[in-house]
Image (cartoon, rainbow, N blue to C red):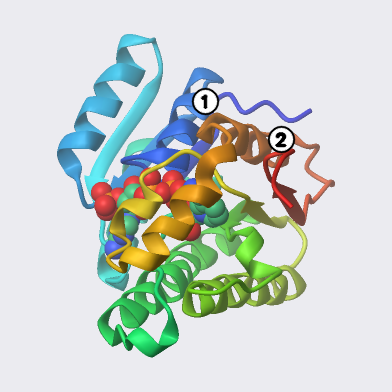
Amino acid sequence: MLPIKDKVIIITGASSGIGEATARLLASRGAHVVLGARRTERLKALVSAIEADGGSAVHQALDVTDPKQMEAIVALARKQYGRVDVLVNNAGVMPLSPLEALKIDEWNRMIDVNIRGVLHGIAAVLPVMKAQGTGQIVNIASIGAYEVSPTAAVYCATKYAVRAITEGLRLEAGPGIRVTLVSPGVTESELADSISDAGAAALMKEYRRHAIPASAIAGAIAYAIEQPADVDVNELVVRPAAQR
Ligand code: NDP
């Protein structure tokens, strides 16, 4: 196993849910975690908690829809720790609704955060990893990257796109740069809070009865990171045992 200790790991969307759990787990394993999200007060509290446990973390405001802010957090990681070993492209939103509700603004927000955000992460970090000769990009998709469900057409489309981009990156990135897709099933987080459509919210409430803790997905991310340097874990699908 590769030690996670001393790896420099940027995590987007670290202010709640899977990103927060991943930050806590990787920091507890000795990584230097660089945390980005828009709710900086949450990140500040998380950094304090990690430091109180003897871990190493910094944070910076990050809106992944802005490529300059993505570049800035990569610059922070390099300034603070001298390199970037892993980027976890985790930030995402999921305002579900039936297509006929025509929530065009919400469609665009999902496209901007879930697809463009991942591309901005890749753009900011790929030249750095190429120059280093090593690195790993972990993109968070969803079981919605494999199957479409009612009210989730646009969300699933964004996650199918993340899966396609990840496979393209794997083919192109070259030796030394590992590329991983982690696709969660229903997981405890704040993801469903942004659903404004009453019908979609009710469906999701029922669906989320079997949710697994965010730490389960953090564990999958850590597994991919800690494999030997010549082992590239390409896809992990992690869902509740009760979820079909
Ligand atoms: P949360 O809502 O708890 O976390 C989402 C994170 O993304 C938050 O930290 C949020 O921070 C951040 N975020 C949202 N928009 C932006 C933005 N524009 N710029 C930067 N950060 C942003 O949900 P999860 O933890 O569940 O979501 C994490 C990932 O897991 C997402 O990609 C999601 O699609 C995926 N996923 C989750 C599943 C689940 O059941 N929970 C299932 C399948 C996939 P802030 O608002 O502070 O910016």
Q: Which amino acid type is marked by label 2?
A: Tyr
Q: Is residue 68 above or below residue 40?
A: below
Q: Is residue 180 left or right of residue 37?
A: right
User: Are the residues tagged 1 and 2 within 8 Å (C-beta)?
Assistant: no
Q: Residue at x 74, y 52 (%)?
A: 244
Could you tell me which residue is drawn at 26 percent across and 61 percent down?
Answer: 63
Q: Quadrant of residue 43?
A: top left
Q: Secondary structure at mark 2?
A: helix
Residue highlighted by disc 1: 25
Q: Nearer the viewer, residue 30 or 158?
A: 158
For the N terminus, give its image quadrant: top right
Type of amino acid at the residue the image marks with label 1? Leu
Q: Which residue: 35% across, 76% down?
A: 112
Front position in the image: 158 or 204: 204
Question: Spatial distance from mark 1 to mark 2, Cα to Cα?
Answer: 11 Å
Q: How many marks?
A: 2
Residue drawn at (84%, 47%) of the image = 230
Residue 209 higher or lower than 26, as above or below: below
Residue 227: give x, y in percent of width and height. 77, 37
Residue 88 showing in the rendered view:
no
Front residue of 145/173: it is 145
Return the x and y of residue 110 as percentages of the image width and height.
38, 73
Q: Which residue is mark 2?
A: 223
Q: Is residue 126 left or right of residue 93?
A: right
